[in-house]
């Protein structure tokens, strides 16, 4: 039971990483000039850029919206992309249908003359809409949008693109158009034929981009990054030199968040760029470490991390914290149950 | 007094009576010492503490006494193997600083047991503070060929070679194993055979042969060896050891330092990554079980933490060096290449330690700069 829960946590983390990989793969493909074998000159992309909708917008008029990815192929043509790689299988269940409905509404939000493009006047003459889904949800999403009234009335070209990681001699992210079309015919044809983006072109980016617009599925994700790459660099080198068994590291969530934004997210070059990760995500990770007993929260809001200079649980850091997360959830459930038992809630429910 | 102890004591005095490195080398070349002693040499690059030498007991084991000279940068140590307290199992070690302060030259006179236990193993295992030259198979071959070319009237032949290779036994997981071969062969033959058998050398011992008038070759009795970590050794003093072999390994050491330096993201104002790649001339990762072998090698590195972020079909790992806080991300997404991305902190000492250990448990590849 608990190993299933640990697997669930690790799968959700893998999905989050997979989404970032898919977004980057799509950004690469959308900016690629096949004939010249290089990126289109002046093409750009941005993760989580804030855009303004007009008063004509059918879903969110005069609002600030943040698509997961915008790709500016040329100064005349762009693509707004939303990634939904963790959808449940399509069924008649109310919650499932609501998740699919939400995807379409989000796409409809971007069917507007959006302001905030990386051009001089922040506008672009033509842009298309892309919904990026996991390979297993490609066909169900196609079925769903085909019969959707909102999709039928979209004023811009819209495509559902499925993504999957595959392995041949090297490893690739496959992008395949499941529904719709794009204005740019070469890109449209490439996605129609299934294009494979080699992960080797994304490695460098993946090592420095670990957050996107959506919050991580679990604090374990952020904790792994902090534990493996950040905390020890903030420690006093003399303490590490002394081959001590552990060291204590003082951290401030604001400064830690700024560091993570510089290292693994976005810092907000201009006012439209989001600052990712959000401070709340970092605080959640630090609070999680307080719960695991690896940190203490001080009255002034700062944290002191106790970092053992050895492997946690004798092995994998992410696995260790995933196990801890399951234990904490179970402990909380037990406490809840005990409290409800004490107050008589459970008996009342049984009656 | 045992003649070996007398020689060790004499060696200890030799350094203090030498005015400079050249004089020390000149004296050493004419210095007689009995078996089982050997002379060991290795350039050491101090990469932390603003090039100051770390405390001797942190670098070496079984240090019986330490003497320093001048501005305390010139150090002499008496080594004593505690586990084998026989009287003659003693050695002496000198750390001679380069004039430009770029490195130290480690010179030791010791029996192989004392050298291994007190110097080589402690240096290989724990230290992130010093970097030794790191030799690939190609570099090892080039050094030996160049060494032979510059020997006047002498040739060399391989007499003993320590190597590593995969061992596959039926019903058992594949693992790395060591092998020692005692075969007389030329350098070319040795490296050709190694390639065919899929093994790579860690240490090669060569015998010096003198060519007679009619082209006949006679053994001189001098045996020298080079280790892939830059240690070189001889069982008798001869000038070419210092004038020929040492400069070659010093240059490789400088190249190692150049390649591993300034890799951390802190070294760049924009916190940019400066990745390295380990390239193989075959599709090693075509077989997906190689990912497992790589993980096994990476997770066995002492004082390193890890997270396996993705294991199959592609490999993505995070590695943390508890010895100095350096950290890395590793990707294997191509059949013939490992992509290594140093993170916020990545010292040359830590990188060197990581690569040395990786190449003890996994086939050695060529380290190159990779585009980010």
Image (tube, coloured by chain):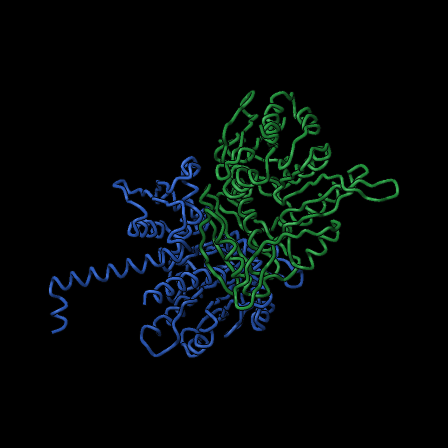
Residue in view at x 36 percent, y 70 percent? A99
Q: Position of residue A148 (x, y in %)?
A: 41, 76
Q: Position of residue A17 (x, y in %)?
A: 45, 60
Task: Report the side of A159 relative to A250 (left or right).
Answer: right
Q: Nearer the viewer, residue A260 or B79?
A: B79
Q: Nearer the viewer, residue B156 or B71?
A: B156
Q: Nearer the viewer, residue B61 or A284?
A: B61
Residue lying furthest right in this view? B214
According to the colouring, which chain is green?
B
Task: Report the side of A285 relative to B138 (left or right).
Answer: left
> In the rendered image, which quarter is residue B215 located in?
top right
From the image, state the color of chain A: blue
Residue B368 showing in the rendered view: no
> In the rendered image, which quarter is residue A231 located in?
top left
Q: Position of residue B213 (x, y in %)?
A: 87, 40
Residue lying furthest front in this view? B1
Residue in view at x 54 percent, y 29 percent? B77
Count up the numbered dots: 0
Question: For the N terminus of chain B, which image quadrant?
Answer: top right
- Determine whether B39 is above or below A228 in the image: above
- Determine whether B135 is above or below B152 in the image: below
Q: Position of residue B72 (x, y in %)?
A: 53, 23
Residue A221 showing in the rendered view: yes
Q: Nearer the viewer, residue A155 or B270?
A: B270
């Amino acid at each position: 039971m608990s190993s299933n829960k640990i697997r669930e946590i690790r799968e959700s983390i893998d999905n989050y990483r997979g989404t970032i990989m898919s977004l980057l793969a799509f950004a690469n493909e959308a900016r690629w000039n096949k004939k010249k074998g290089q990126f289109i000159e002046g093409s750009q992309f941005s993760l989580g850029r804030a855009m303004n909708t007009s008063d004509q917008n059918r879903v969110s008029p005069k609002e600030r919206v943040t698509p997961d990815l915008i790709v500016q192929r040329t100064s005349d043509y762009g693509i707004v992309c939303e990634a939904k790689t963790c959808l449940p299988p399509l069924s008649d269940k109310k919650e499932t249908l609501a998740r699919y409905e939400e995807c379409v509404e989000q796409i409809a939000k971007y069917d507007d003359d959006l302001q905030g493009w990386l051009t001089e006047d922040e506008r672009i003459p033509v842009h298309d809409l892309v919904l990026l889904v996991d390979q297993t949800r490609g066909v169900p999403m196609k079925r769903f949008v085909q019969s959707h009234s909102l999709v039928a009335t979209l004023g811009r070209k819209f495509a559902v693109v499925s993504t999957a990681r595959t392995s041949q001699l090297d490893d690739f992210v496959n992008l395949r158009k499941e529904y719709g079309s794009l204005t740019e015919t070469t890109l449209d044809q490439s996605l129609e034929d299934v294009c494979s983006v080699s992960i080797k072109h994304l490695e460098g980016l993946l090592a420095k981009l670990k957050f996107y617009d959506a919050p991580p599925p679990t604090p374990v994700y952020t904790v792994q990054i902090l534990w493996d790459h950040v905390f020890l660099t903030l420690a006093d080198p003399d303490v590490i030199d002394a081959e001590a068994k552990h060291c204590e590291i003082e951290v401030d969530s604001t400064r830690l968040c700024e560091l993570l934004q510089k290292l693994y997210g976005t810092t907000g070059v201009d006012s439209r760029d989001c600052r990712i990760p959000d401070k709340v995500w970092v605080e959640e990770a630090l609070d999680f470490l307080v719960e695991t007993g690896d940190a203490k929260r001080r009255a002034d809001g700062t944290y002191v991390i106790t970092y053992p200079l050895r492997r946690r649980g004798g092995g994998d850091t992410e696995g260790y914290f995933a196990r801890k997360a399951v234990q904490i959830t179970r402990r909380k459930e037990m406490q809840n149950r005990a409290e409800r038992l004490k107050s008589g809630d459970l008996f009342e429910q049984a009656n | 007094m045992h003649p070996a102890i007398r020689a060790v004591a004499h060696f200890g005095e030799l350094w203090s009576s030498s005015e400079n490195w050249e004089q020390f080398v000149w004296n050493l070349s004419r210095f007689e010492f009995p078996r089982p002693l050997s002379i060991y040499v290795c350039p050491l690059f101090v990469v932390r503490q603003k090039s100051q030498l770390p405390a001797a007991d942190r670098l070496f084991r079984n240090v019986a006494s330490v003497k320093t000279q001048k501005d305390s940068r010139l150090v002499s140590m008496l080594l004593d193997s505690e586990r084998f307290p026989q009287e003659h199992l003693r050695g002496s070690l000198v750390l001679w600083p380069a004039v430009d302060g770029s490195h130290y030259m480690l010179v030791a006179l010791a029996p192989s047991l004392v050298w291994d236990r007190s110097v080589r193993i402690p240096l290989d295992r724990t230290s992130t503070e010093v970097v030794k030259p790191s030799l690939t198979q190609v570099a090892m071959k080039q050094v030996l060929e160049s060494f032979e070319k510059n020997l006047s009237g002498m040739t060399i032949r391989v007499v003993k070679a320590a190597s590593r290779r995969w061992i596959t036994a039926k019903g058992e997981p594949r693992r790395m194993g060591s092998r020692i071969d005692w075969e007389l062969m030329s350098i070319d033959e040795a490296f050709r055979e190694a390639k065919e058998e899929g093994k790579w050398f860690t240490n090669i011992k060569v015998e010096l042969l003198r060519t007679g008038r009619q082209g006949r070759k006679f053994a001189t009795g001098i045996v020298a060896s080079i280790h892939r970590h830059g240690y070189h050794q001889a069982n008798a003093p001869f000038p070419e050891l210092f004038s020929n072999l040492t400069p070659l390994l010093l240059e490789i050491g400088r190249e190692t330092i150049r390649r591993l330096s300034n890799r951390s993201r802190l070294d760049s104002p924009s916190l940019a990554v400066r990745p390295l790649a380990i390239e193989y001339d075959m599709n090693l990762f075509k077989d997906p079980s190689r990912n497992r072998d790589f993980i096994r090698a990476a997770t066995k590195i002492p004082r390193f933490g890890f997270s396996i972020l993705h294991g199959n079909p592609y490999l993505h790992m995070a590695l943390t060096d508890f010895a100095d806080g350096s950290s890395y991300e590793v990707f294997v997404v191509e059949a013939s290449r490992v992509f290594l991305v140093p993170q916020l902190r990545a010292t040359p000492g830590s990188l060197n330690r990581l690569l040395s250990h990786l190449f003890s448990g996994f086939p050695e590849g060529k380290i190159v700069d990779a585009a980010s």
